[in-house]
Image (cartoon, helix red, strand yellow):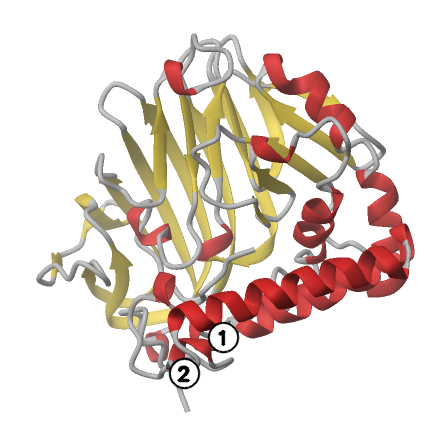
C-alpha cells in the first residue's frame, strides 16, 4: 500500500528522492534564488515523476545532456502546481534549473532597516509545514527523506548558513558550501543569508547572530551544551554532529524552528535573564522527536510536537527541578484550553489526528512550537 498525503502532489509509487545537489545563487535585488539541482532517486524512474512546486519558474529539465519534457498543472493556491518531469525511461538521476518567485512563501527577505545592524539585508527560510516547494521542486511530504549538498553564492561580505554541515566558506568571495549527510524531510531544509558572526558555546554548540546581537545571544544561550549532555542521557546519542543556533530578525513568526544542526530562534528570546532556556530545550528535543522520527503526514503532527513537549518537560525537570517543569506544564495546559475554546471545543482542529481531507498543512496545527 502506497501512502497518500493530501497535502502533496507526490505519488510515492513512482519512487522517492534520495539525494539532491544544489547550486544556489542569492539575488537580493530581485528577491529570488537561481537554482540548479541534480536529483538522485532511490530507484530508476520509468515514465513521469510528479513533484510539488509553488510559483517556481522552471527553465530546464535534463538527464545528462538530454533535454526532458516537462509541464506544470494549473495552479492551486494551497498546493501550488504539480510538475510532471517526463521521459525518465529508467533514469535514476536528472537535473532541473529554476528560479524562485519573489512571492515564495518559504522565503522572507528583510531590508536593512528591518535588521539589528541596519546596513545589510537578511534572508531566511521557513519551510514547515509544506513550503519547501516554493524553493525547489520536491516531494513535499514528511514521509520522504533525502540527503543533500549545496553550493551557495551570495553578495560579497554577507554570510550564508544552512541547516547542514559547512564544508567550505569564503565571506570575501561570497561562496559557501554545505553537506547534509543525514536524510531529512523537505520541511527541515533551511537557509539564511545576512551579515553574521559566530561564537562557540561548547564543543558541539555555537550561535550565529548579527554582530550587534552576538554578545547578548551568546550569554543568553551559553548553557546549551549542558542541556545537550542531559538530553543525551535521557534520549540517547545526538546523531546530527553539531547543534548551532541562528538568531533571526523579529519578523520570524515562531519562537524557534528545529532545523537540524541549526535551530532558528526569535530575538525576543534574548531577555538578559536566560529565562527562555526552555525554548532551546524544546527545539533541541526535536533532534530526536521529529527530526529522527517524523510523522508520515501532517494529519499526525501531534506525534512530532506532542512527544517533543514530553521530552522538553523531562529535560527541564532534570535541569531546573520538578517545580519549574510543573509550572511550565500548567501554563501550557491553560494555553491549550484557551486555544481550544477560541477554535471551538467540538472543532475537528482540536483533535489529535487532523481531518483526512485537509490539504493545507499550515492550517492543521493550532500552535507551532
Label 1: element kind: loop
Residue situated in front as seen by the camera: 160 or 12: 160
- Which label sits in the foreground, 2 or 1? 1
Question: Which residue is depicted at the point 71% across and 41% down?
Answer: 276
Q: How far across and down, in percent of the image, does residue 310 sit?
A: 73, 68
Write down the residue under mark 2. 3
For this view, does 342 lie left or right of residue 63? right
Residue closest to the eye, 125 or 9: 125
Q: Marks 2 and 1: CB-CB under 8 Å?
A: yes
Q: Position of residue 210 (x, y in %)?
A: 57, 18
Seen from the viewer's position, the closer of residues 320 and 182 is 320
SS assignment at label 2: loop
- Decide if residue 43 is on the left or right side of residue 65: right
Q: Is residue 243 above or below residue 291?
A: above
> Residue 27: horizontal and vertical position, in percent?
30, 23
Quadrant of residue 84 within the rendered picture: bottom left
Residue 60 placement: quadrant: top left
Image coordinates of residue 230 in percent, x first then y, are: 89, 53
Residue ID at (30%, 66%): 360
Q: Residue at x 57, y 62 (%)?
A: 335
Q: Residue at x 77, y 59 (%)?
A: 327
Q: Earlier in the sequence, mark 2 or mark 1?
A: 2
Residue 296 bears which disc, if any? 1
Amino acid at each position: 500500500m502506497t501512502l497518500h498525503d493530501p497535502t502533496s502532489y507526490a505519488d510515492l509509487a513512482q519512487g522517492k528522492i534520495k539525494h539532491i545537489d544544489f547550486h544556489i545563487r542569492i539575488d537580493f535585488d530581485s528577491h529570488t534564488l537561481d537554482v540548479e539541482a541534480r536529483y538522485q532517486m532511490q530507484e530508476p524512474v520509468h515514465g513521469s515523476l510528479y513533484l510539488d512546486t509553488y510559483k517556481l519558474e522552471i527553465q530546464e529539465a535534463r538527464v545528462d545532456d538530454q533535454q526532458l519534457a516537462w509541464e506544470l498543472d494549473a495552479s492551486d493556491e494551497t498546493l501550488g502546481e504539480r510538475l510532471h518531469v517526463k521521459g525518465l525511461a529508467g533514469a535514476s538521476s536528472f537535473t532541473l534549473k529554476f528560479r524562485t518567485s519573489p512571492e515564495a512563501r518559504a522565503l522572507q527577505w528583510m531590508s536593512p532597516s528591518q535588521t539589528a545592524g541596519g546596513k545589510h539585508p537578511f534572508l531566511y527560510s521557513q519551510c514547515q509545514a509544506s513550503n519547501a516547494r516554493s524553493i525547489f521542486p520536491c516531494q513535499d511530504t514528511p514521509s520522504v527523506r533525502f540527503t543533500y549538498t549545496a553550493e551557495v553564492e551570495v553578495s560579497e561580505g554577507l554570510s550564508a548558513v544552512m541547516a547542514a554541515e559547512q564544508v567550505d566558506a569564503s565571506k570575501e568571495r561570497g561562496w559557501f558550501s554545505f553537506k547534509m549527510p543525514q536524510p531529512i524531510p523537505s520541511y527541515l531544509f533551511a537557509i539564511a543569508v545576512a551579515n553574521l558572526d559566530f561564537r562557540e558555546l561548547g564543543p558541539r554548540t555555537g550561535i550565529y547572530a548579527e554582530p550587534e546581537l552576538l554578545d547578548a545571544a551568546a550569554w543568553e544561550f551559553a548553557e546549551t551544551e549542558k542541556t545537550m549532555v542531559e538530553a543525551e542521557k535521557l534520549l540517547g546519542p545526538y546523531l546530527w554532529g553539531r547543534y548551532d543556533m541562528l538568531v533571526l530578525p523579529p519578523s520570524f513568526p515562531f519562537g524557534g524552528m528545529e532545523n537540524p544542526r541549526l535551530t532558528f530562534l526569535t530575538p525576543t528570546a534574548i531577555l538578559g535573564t536566560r529565562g527562555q532556556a526552555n525554548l532551546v530545550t524544546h527545539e533541541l528535543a526535536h533532534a530526536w522527536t521529529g527530526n529522527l522520527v517524523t510523522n508520515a503526514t501532517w494529519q499526525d503532527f501531534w506525534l512530532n510536537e506532542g512527544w517533543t513537549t514530553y521530552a522538553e518537560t523531562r529535560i527541564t525537570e532534570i535541569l531546573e527541578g520538578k517545580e519549574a517543569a510543573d509550572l511550565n506544564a500548567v501554563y501550557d495546559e491553560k494555553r491549550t484550553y484557551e486555544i481550544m475554546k477560541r477554535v471551538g471545543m467540538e472543532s475537528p482542529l482540536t483533535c489529535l489526528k487532523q481531518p483526512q481531507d485537509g490539504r493545507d498543512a499550515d492550517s492543521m496545527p493550532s500552535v507551532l512550537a
